[in-house]
Amino acid sequence: MSEVQDFDGPEPYFRTSVIQLDRPGDPSVFPPETHADAQAIIARYPEGQARSALLPMLHLVQSIQSYITPDGIAFCSDHTGLTKAQVAAVATFYTMYKRKPTGDYLVSVCTNTLCGMLGGDEIFAALKEQIGVGNSGGTPGSGGIAADGKITLEHAECLAACDYAPVVTVNYEFFDNQTVGSARSLVSELQSGASPQPSRGGSLCSFKQIERQIAGFFDAETLAPEAVSAGLPTEIGVNLAVERGESAPGYPMEGGK
Amino acid sequence: MPLAPVLTKRFGTDQPWKIENYERLDGYAGLKKALTLKPEDIVGLVKDSNLRGRGGAGFPTGMKWSFVAEPKGVPQGDRYVVVNADEGEPGTCRDLPLMMNDPHSMVEGIIIACYAIKSSHGFVYIRGEAIHAIRRVTAAVEEARAKGYLGKNILGSGFDCEITVHAGAGAYICGEETALLDSLEGRRGQPRLKPPFPATNGLYDKPTTVNNVGTLASVPYIVLGGAEWFKGIGPEGSPGPCIYSLSGRVKQPGQYEAPMGTTLRELLDLAGGMSRGKNIKFWTPGGSSTPMFTAEHLDVPLDFDAAAKAGSMNGTSAVMIFDEDDCVVRATKKWIEFYKHESCGKCTPCREGTYWLNGIYQRLEAGTGTAEDLEKLLDISDNILGRSFCALGDGATSSITSSINFFREEYEAHLDGRGCPFPGARVLAGAH
């Protein structure tokens, strides 16, 4: 996530520097079924292309450990045949791979231009104070993890939901059209152990559980076939077209059907 | 211009993401028809329709496909269709709703594209954060497989096709097609030097077409309606419907699908006007990488050619709207923070340039900027533009050069100890 910092200050999260490779890592800390899952990921790609499985596999290790550790790196290295250096180079490139333990709930506040100017900046400032991560982790602009380890706060770049701005996500599930007040209540609910319902998409689960989904492992329930897909902004155009009796031209008769 | 829902026409109907509902509304009729045609005829049809890529660049899709289909002696399995569903350009919020509500139109488009270019494997690269859309597309692929639209010998045609859904991990750069391919191969998402282009040396070094979600979702309709029908919507040079995604200071933000070439004045009218009763000040026609427009540009037809002629780009048709109480320096500063964070670091002008640009914007907002800083912004922008492997750095410069061009006085009002004259921004600068 983007760090807002004094220009002359240090660059504490320089992209390539921060995975603790102070020990070789032990893939055997992962249970046998996780090793089987890694092989299942590899099977999704053409033969001989095991390396393609690396991104989902790193999500898989976060579903067990909540962040990328030397164990996770060794695990991916074993399954893909890449060196640990190659795996670490990839793991440090992408924002979603975490360098520190992640809480049960990862709260991301969009502070890119559109959401930020419509209230995202105020929401982020308010949540930093509420969760108490204002001064953890070094830089003034960064989030961090709450003392009890339950919530990690970060500010996110554009989450592709600008028509629902400002948005907050919890474990990547959307809470649309937030205000400082609604975001504070959302966090209070999380702190009290409740499970608030996202605006669109499935029910809330833990960070580790959502990482398992991102790795591509679902069951009938987690695929959430009944979950709401849209809010008003998604359907506004088509609703208006119906109301006004407007439509695209019909297909020509000799055409498709 | 009236609304013309095509890609969004099923939105708002009963659970349109489920295959039985999709089938009831023309779903997979395009595939059935396509399988009765020769692959090269489908490429020809898409060429004739003049469908241009919805991902931003507007490259003719049929031409792209013909390059991939061309190389002789490539076995069926050794060509790939890759869907760019890594939506992340600031302001852009069109592909995720499409995948959430009507994932089968994209899936059907992928299968037709595979058939047309003689591929048997499509990949959907979805940004990792978009787990809600990943679920919907995964479910759609499973449903399509269960119904025999995917797998071996599809609908008795002898054609085989598989789709793999792949989640990214949070990197805007992976929306650049060659960075996306590197990422899909399990590498850092960094753009490749072109040529060679993906059409000849793409995924796993095999001929590959990388297409946007909306581009592929348009294909079943073109197969059903024909090239002439598609060209009958919107202007000749960039035909078809366009999903305009309105956001910001507008009464009713959202997805408005109208013919290409609709103006912002018409769109604002549909969206109920400005939200705070203030005048419009600046807006992007197609995401943060497209040079901004102002109130002077309300009547520019928003299509690939007309937007370019007016000095910007139709881009992803992500229209972010700001009013006179919004500080253009603050908006640009936040975009620059974004580009600095998302620069992959491969090319020096972009990596170093966005770093220094960001520093200058921090100074401007804090009030420690000087008149030379404005010239420095333009000079650095000039040194980034066109000097890197991909267009990320170019995109960063768009908002800078266009905002200084239109709002130089507002930049000057920030100089010499004054800082941001808009009270909200000053408070927030302190809050960080």
Image (spheres, coloured by chain):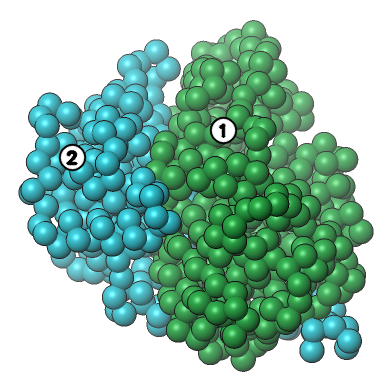
Q: Residue at x 39, y 13 (%)?
A: A8
Q: Is residue B92 above or below residue A23?
A: below
In the image: residue B26, left or right of residue A99: right
Q: Which mark is residue B192?
A: 1
What chain does badge 1 belong to? B
Three-letter amino acid code at the position of disc 1: Arg
Q: Residue at x 46, y 53 (%)?
A: B127
What chain does badge 2 belong to? A
Q: Residue at x 45, y 63 (%)?
A: B164
The local secondary structure at tag 1 comes to loop
In the image: residue A196, left or right of residue B286: left
Quarter of the image for the C terminus of chain B: give it.
Answer: top left
**As rendered, which of B427 and A193 lies closer to the eye?**
A193
Both labels 2 and 1 in a single chain: no
In the image: residue A74, left or right of residue B292: left
Three-letter amino acid code at the position of disc 2: Ala
